[in-house]
Image: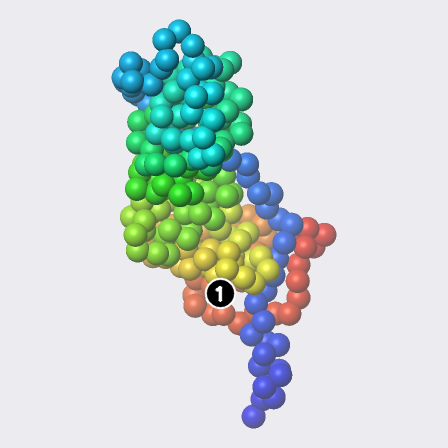
Amino acid sequence: MQDSADLAVRKKPVVVTGFHEPQPLSLAWEEGEQSVWAAIDLDNRNWRMPGDWQKSIDSELKYPTPSGMRLSYILALAPNDIALPYLRRPPAVSHVVPIQPLCRLLARFGTEAIDFVLAIAQTRRSFVPAVMMPITGSDMTRWMANWLNGKTYHDSAQAWFDRHIDWATADLIAAALATPGKDRRSAETALRTLALIDGYRDLILTVAANYGPEVATPITALLDGDQAGTRRIFSADSF
């Protein structure tokens, strides 16, 4: 019989690092999508104090947790120079926030609005899947991998990966070969799930192969259901 310590060594996951740089949060619009979102009609009569946008914002921010609904509408309608500083420093908010002002914020201000939208999305999730569809980046890939492995937002996450699979695959591969932990397990499960979709297994293996055998071999084993790996930890110096 093999020694139990030897079996433990042989089953230790392969860790490969340094082959993929995390991607910043960004936006990838479908054709015509941004212009449609930017043109969303908001009834500004309910969200603006006459002639003074700054006073409207100050009125909301005087509370410890301002109304996310009112603040989102005001910022979505306010002039760029007034709204931008508050998008860059999103406050904690209360109340449910409709999707319309958040979509308009993303379309108007682009990446400058992402932090504000995601800050609200952390706690107000009923609308989240639709407004998050154009947002990309490694943090989004990790977020969507968790959703893909669950039930509540599985379909929304699947739609997000269908839309961004060409570049999100590299994020998943890097996470699936990172130091063992929650994010790695989530990425591993997401890759197996996506590999069941027609064409995605080949795409995953092709992206992995582009990084060389150090990456391709453990990813192939992962998709084939083989969890055994070597003890060696690869780094960027290996490539």
Residue 189 seen anywhere in this rendered image of the structure? yes
Question: Up-down: is 12 above or below 27?
Answer: below
Q: Quadrant of the N terminus?
A: bottom right
Comparing 185 with 83, the one in front is: 83
The extreme bottom residue here reads 1
Comparing 188 with 197, the one in front is: 188
Q: Secondary structure at mark 1?
A: helix
Comparing 104 with 2, the one in front is: 104
Residue 103 seen anywhere in this rendered image of the structure? no
Question: Up-down: is 91 above or below 175?
Answer: above
Q: Is residue 235 left or right of residue 130?
A: right
Residue 100 percent across, percent down from the top left: 31, 27
Residue 38 percent across, percent down from the top left: 35, 19
Crowding near pointer 1: few (<14 within 10 Å), some, many (20+)?
few
Q: Is residue 192 left or right of residue 7?
A: left
Amino acid carrying mark 1 in the image:
Ala
Residue 84 percent across, percent down from the top left: 50, 20
Residue under the image location 60 percent in, 43 percent down: 21
Q: How many marks?
A: 1
The extreme right residue here reads 237
Residue under the image location 53 percent in, 53 percent down: 175
The extreme top residue here reads 51
Q: How is the image coloured?
A: rainbow
Residue under the image location 32 percent in, 49 percent down: 153
Please name the residue that numbered disc 1 is placed on: 221
Residue 70 percent across, percent down from the top left: 36, 25
Residue under the image location 36 percent in, 52 percent down: 148
